Image (spheres, coloured by chain):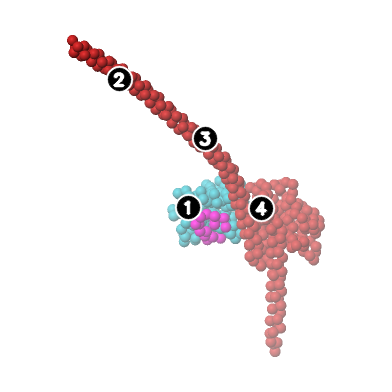
Chain colours: A cyan, B red
């Protein structure tokens, strides 16, 4: 049963992503509203995959990724960035600090599900 | 002498009988040989006729199998075609499901609160995250002044968006006529100060326009509008309008209620001596 952490400040996007994740068999979605909340959930739950926005209050997604990658307990968890930032340099930056994949908004649900399935079904 | 003659006669008779027996035996042997040959011929004929029957049987079976194979191939083709149709239909249904999920979430969020500022925030979220707009404004109708006044923006400040007279320019016309406006080139960058959006969606309650959403540019990755975008525009035109209108009324009535309550409290206070 994969536990998917959705770190996103927009309630609309959180609900939309949670809806999409219902299509992943037996998955459980845990929601966090910013980077700090995401880290809290990461330490209190067993997380198999993280879907993370970049622009968030309190702590942004890039900071969350770099902190997660610096922690041996979370360094192997796949992190998919979901953001409005569509520039190539933003993508390169996110991948360089340890994001596993990069999706731009508005998201294509099918594409997201395919990507998540790919990470969940691949041993890491 | 006579005895010898008898013996000779008997010997001749015996010899004749013996010869006849020999001839008879020879004939029997020949007949036997002929019959054996005939039997062999018949056996061969019988064997040959069995092979032919079997070959005929096999040929019939091969033909039946070939017919069956062709029919199966035909059925396979049909099933393959059906599968392709099903796969295409499945993709369509999936897309439709996703679109419905987007519309459901947008509608659910719009009606999740009666706080005017929260509703505006949700409208902004929907336009950024679900439509993919970079710079845009929510501009509402001010009935007293007959002007369209910006109340929320994204990617720019409120001061970048001037007030617009009802019926004037792209925004004013969209508000007056209640018809959405789409620029020929939606990838271009609209100009907020000149009142030139790339998209303008009137917010309507039935035929009454309460404002517009003016989009001035789209996110870099947003290349074109899809069906779901137009559905979202329709949804925003109706649901965002009612959500904004009702939340504004609710906020105003809350404010009035607080004022009246304070006033009543003042009246209820005992006069100081």
Q: Earlier in the sequence, mark 3 or mark 4?
A: 3
Q: Position of residue A13 (x, y in %)?
A: 60, 57
Q: Residue A42 versus residue A118: which sits nearer the camera?
A: A118
* Mark 1, residue position: A77
Q: Are marks 4 and 2 in contact (CB under 8 Å)?
A: no
Count residues near mark 1 (Cα–Cα under 10 Å), then give few for <14, some for 14-19, many for 20+: some
Question: Mark 2 or mark 1, which is nearer to you?
Answer: 2
In the rendered image, is residue B204 in sight?
yes
**B37 on left or right of A34:** left
Q: Earlier in the sequence, mark 2 or mark 3?
A: 2
Q: Are marks 2 and 1 in contact (CB under 8 Å)?
A: no
* Mark 4, residue position: B228
**A65 on left or right of B46:** right
Which quadrant is home to the N terminus of chain B? Answer: top left
* Mark 3, residue position: B63
Question: Mark 3 or mark 1, which is nearer to you?
Answer: 3
Which quadrant is home to the C terminus of chain B? Answer: bottom right
Question: How far apart are the two marked residues, 3 and 1, measured between alpha carbons?
Answer: 61 Å
Are marks 4 and 2 in one subunit?
yes
Q: Chain of mark 4?
A: B
Are marks 1 and 4 in one subunit?
no
The number of callouts visible is 4
Secondary structure under the numbered disc 2 in the rendered image = helix
What residue span does the magenta drawing correspond to? A19-37
Question: How far apart are the two marked residues, 2 and 3, measured between alpha carbons?
Answer: 56 Å
* Mark 2, residue position: B25
Q: Residue B139 versus residue B126: which sits nearer the camera?
A: B126
Count residues near mark 4 (Cα–Cα under 10 Å), then give few for <14, some for 14-19, many for 20+: some
């Amino acid at each position: 049963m994969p536990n998917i952490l959705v770190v996103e400040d927009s309630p609309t996007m959180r609900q939309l992503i949670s809806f999409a994740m219902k299509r992943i068999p037996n998955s459980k979605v845990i929601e966090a509203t910013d980077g700090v909340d995401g880290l809290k959930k990461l330490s209190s739950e067993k997380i198999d995959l993280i879907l993370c926005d970049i622009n968030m209050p309190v702590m942004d997604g890039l900071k969350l990724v770099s902190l997660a990658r610096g922690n041996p307990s979370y360094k192997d968890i796949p992190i998919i960035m979901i953001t409005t930032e569509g520039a190539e340099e933003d993508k390169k930056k996110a991948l360089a600090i340890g994001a596993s994949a990069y999706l731009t908004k508005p998201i294509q649900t099918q594409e997201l599900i395919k990507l998540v399935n790919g990470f969940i079904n691949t041993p890491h | 002498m006579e005895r010898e003659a008898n013996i000779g006669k008997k010997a001749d008779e015996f010899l004749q009988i013996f010869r006849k027996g020999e001839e008879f035996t020879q004939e029997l042997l020949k007949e036997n040989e002929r019959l054996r040959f005939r039997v062999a011929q018949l056996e061969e004929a019988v064997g040959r006729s069995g092979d032919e029957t079997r070959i005929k049987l096999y040929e019939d079976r091969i033909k039946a199998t070939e017919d069956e194979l062709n029919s199966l191939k035909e059925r396979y083709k049909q099933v393959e075609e059906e599968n392709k149709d099903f796969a295409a239909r499945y993709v369509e249904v999936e897309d439709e499901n996703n679109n419905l999920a987007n519309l459901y979430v947008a509608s659910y969020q719009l009606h999740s609160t009666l706080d005017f500022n929260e509703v505006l925030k949700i409208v902004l979220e929907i336009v950024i995250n679900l439509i993919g707009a970079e710079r845009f404004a929510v501009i509402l109708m001010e009935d007293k002044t007959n002007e369209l006044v910006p109340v929320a923006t994204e990617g720019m400040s409120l001061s970048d968006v001037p007030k617009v007279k009802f019926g004037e320019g792209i925004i004013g016309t969209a508000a007056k006529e209640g018809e959405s406006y789409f620029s020929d080139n939606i990838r271009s960058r609209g100009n907020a100060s000149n009142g030139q959006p790339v998209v303008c969606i009137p917010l309507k309650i039935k035929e009454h326009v309460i404002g517009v959403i003016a989009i001035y540019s789209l996110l870099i990755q947003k290349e074109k509008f899809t069906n779901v975008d137009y559905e979202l525009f329709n949804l925003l035109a109706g649901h965002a309008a009612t959500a904004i209108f009702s939340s504004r009324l609710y906020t105003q009535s809350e404010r009035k209620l607080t004022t009246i309550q304070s006033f009543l409290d003042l009246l209820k206070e005992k006069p100081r001596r």
